[in-house]
Structures are given as structure tokens and as C-alpha cells.
Image (cartoon, rainbow, N blue to C red):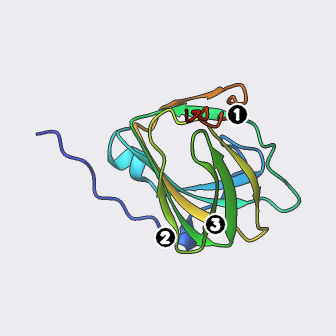
Amino acid sequence: MNRSAFRVSHLKNSAFVKRGLRGYFEYRDLGIKRATRGKVVAHVIRARPGKAPHGEWHLHDCKLQFVYVLKGWVLFEYQGIGRVMMKAGSCFYQPPRIRHREIRHSSNLEMIEIVGPSSFKTFSVKKPAARKSPARRSRG
């Protein structure tokens, strides 16, 4: 029988590490990757003091990604959607491969992020083309 393992992650026994996808964040692994044998990864992300986002457009090649903001705020921009402000209590789902970027965040930002599968690739992408307004039709 292929069962996932029961896991508990207590704050006092966990550490934030500066290694991770973005250099302006610290990550605390919640043990879900190991418990699910790589099906899902979950971590707490917090802002590193004195570090700011680069605003680089990118996408993640994953099947599932959602984030819950615990503290502070973060401003993202999504292709085809525009800028979206996420605040403490906001939960958002990012569809697979959506082009996006982080513009800025508060110094006290903390989020929980869940991604599946746990091993996924991130690709830098060019800035999306600006949306053109629909052509006006002449009335005649």
C-alpha cells in the first residue's frame, strides 16, 4: 500500500532559509513534500529585510499553485488581468503557466504557498504585449 506519511512541523523546530526560488524571500519548509513523496510542496514565505523584488516576468510549469497571505501585503501583475493587491487574509490561485511578476511587498509579508508537483520549473519570460483596445466600428 502506497501511503503518505503523517508529518508535523512546529515553528520552534523549523528554520527559515535564504535558499529558494527568490533571493528576496526566506522559506520555511512545512514537511509536505516529504510526506507526499514529492506530489506537493508547502512552505511559509517571508520577506527578507532590505531585499526588494526584481519585478521580472516569469511563469511556473506546475499543475497547482495557490498562496494564502498571512501578514502584510504583496502587489502582483498578471498577463491579461493586470495588477492585483493581495493583503493579509487573501488567498489566490495562479493557473498553471500564467505569466506574472511581483512588483513590491511590505516588509512584514508572510505567505503560505502550496505547489504541485513539488519539483517544477520556473521560466523567465518577456514582458507581455500591451492589450490593444478593440477597434471602434463606424456607424454608417
Q: Are marks 2 and 1 in contact (CB under 8 Å)?
A: no
Classify 10 Å Cα crowding around label 2: few (below 14), some (14-19), many (20 and above). few
Q: Which mark is residue 110?
A: 3
Q: Nearer the viewer, mark 1 or mark 3?
A: 1
Q: Which of the image's four quarters has the C terminus?
A: top right
Residue lying at the far front of the rendered structure: 140
Q: Which mark is residue 130?
A: 1
Rendered position, 101 above or below 126: below
Decide which of 61, 99 is in the foreground and name it: 99
Residue lying at the far left of the rendered structure: 1
Identified at 78% across, 50% down, the residue is 24
* N-term-proximal mark, 3 vs 2: 2
Decide which of 111, 8 is in the foreground and name it: 111
Residue 77: percent from the left, percent from the top?
66, 48
Figure disc tally: 3
Residue 53: percent from the left, percent from the top?
79, 49
Say what secondary structure mark 1 lies in: loop
Q: CA distance from mark 2 to mark 1?
A: 45 Å
Residue 98: percent from the left, percent from the top?
53, 36
Residue 109: percent from the left, percent from the top?
69, 67
Quadrant housing residue 16: bottom right
Rendered position, 104 above or below 72: above
Identified at 40% across, 52% down, the residue is 32
Say what secondary structure mark 2 lies in: loop
Identified at 48% across, 58% down, the residue is 92
* Residue type marked 1: Ala
Say what secondary structure mark 3 lies in: strand
* Residue type marked 2: His
Query: Which residue position holds label 2?
Result: 10
